Image (spheres, helix red, strand yellow):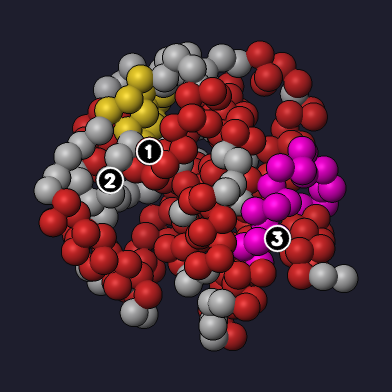
Amino acid sequence: MDRVDELMGRARRATGLDYFGEDSFREGLGRLVESLDTEARLSEAGAAALDGQVVHFLAQRLQVEDWYRRHPEIEEQQIVAPLIGLGLPRTGSTALGCLLGEDPGVRSLRTWEASSPCPPPDKATEASDPRIEVARATLAQRAVRFPRMQMMYPSSATSPTECQGLMALDFKTHLFQALAQVPDYAQWLNGEADLGPTYRYVKRVLKLLQWRCPPTRWRLKNPSHILFMEALNKVFPDARFWMTHRDITEVVPSSADLYFELVRA
């Protein structure tokens, strides 16, 4: 059994589910695992942590597909004219994204639901969803391990977050290159990968998230969408976009400082 089969098997055993949906995720998963195994130079603890992340996303994908199997009416949901933030990182986009998310008439992708969209939230219980406390604990651990992160990337369990976690369900996301040195995977992602299936899966999860928990007017944000505009436009042809700006001579050192904070622990 190769490493990809092993990780997929772990996800199946953890959930008791077997169907991952379309195979679009397999190429990204294979390339990621190969880069982790041959390039990342992870410690034993680091390798276990990254494997755990991969299994988590595979398990979430299994659960997404199970909800669609049991409730095919979810497919009838419509994602209409989302407003999407993109552009360079470290330009104030997090602040603007949080400000836009304050509108009670719109829907944002919240930290607590981004990496664990299942079970889909329910309007009646969203304020007391147990994943909120899990996210708070995770952010508290982050604050201990990466003391400057809250200043550099302010967030809370209920604040809007980027789409990286949803893209990770198709294993085409910049999230992984923020967690480990995976240059071959990054080169493939940025220059060769087809992001069409990825954005179709993001749309699939957004439908699931709004199904029992309106409103349905989405305000999304992810700077790296700017690299994949053709695929993004095909999947969300009525999307509107916003972008924040900052002098590039400030963006580059700020981005480098953020990555330094992430990798130095």
For marks 2 and 3, the one nearer the N-term is 3
For marks 1 and 2, the one nearer the N-term is 2
Q: Secondary structure at mark 1?
A: helix
In the displayed structure, would residue 168 be above or below residue 213? below
Question: Is residue 46 visible in the rendered structure shown here?
Answer: yes
Specify the label residue 30 is tagged with: 3
**Which residue sits at x=51%, y=50%?**
191
Quadrant in which residue 72 is drawn: top right
Q: Specify whether 9 is left or right of 112.
A: right
**Which residue sits at x=54%, y=83%?**
41
How far is the residue under mark 2 from the one under mark 3?
Answer: 28 Å
For marks 3 and 1, the one nearer the N-term is 3
- Quarter of the picture containing the N terminus is bottom right
Please give the residue where the numbered disc 1 appears in the rendered image: 226
Q: Nearer the viewer, residue 90 or 127?
A: 90
Specify the label residue 88 is tagged with: 2
102 within the magenta span: no
Q: Residues within 10 Å of mark 1 (few under 14, many from 20)?
A: some
Q: Residues within 10 Å of mark 2 (few under 14, many from 20)?
A: many
x, y (%) of residue 43? Answer: 54, 85
Query: What's drawn in magenta, residue-wise?
Result: 15-33
As drawn, the residue found furthest toward the right would be: 1
**Which residue sits at x=23%, y=51%?**
90
x, y (%) of residue 19? Answer: 82, 43
Q: Tell whether label 2 touches label 1 (CB within 8 Å).
A: yes
**Type of amino acid at the residue the image marks with label 2:** Leu
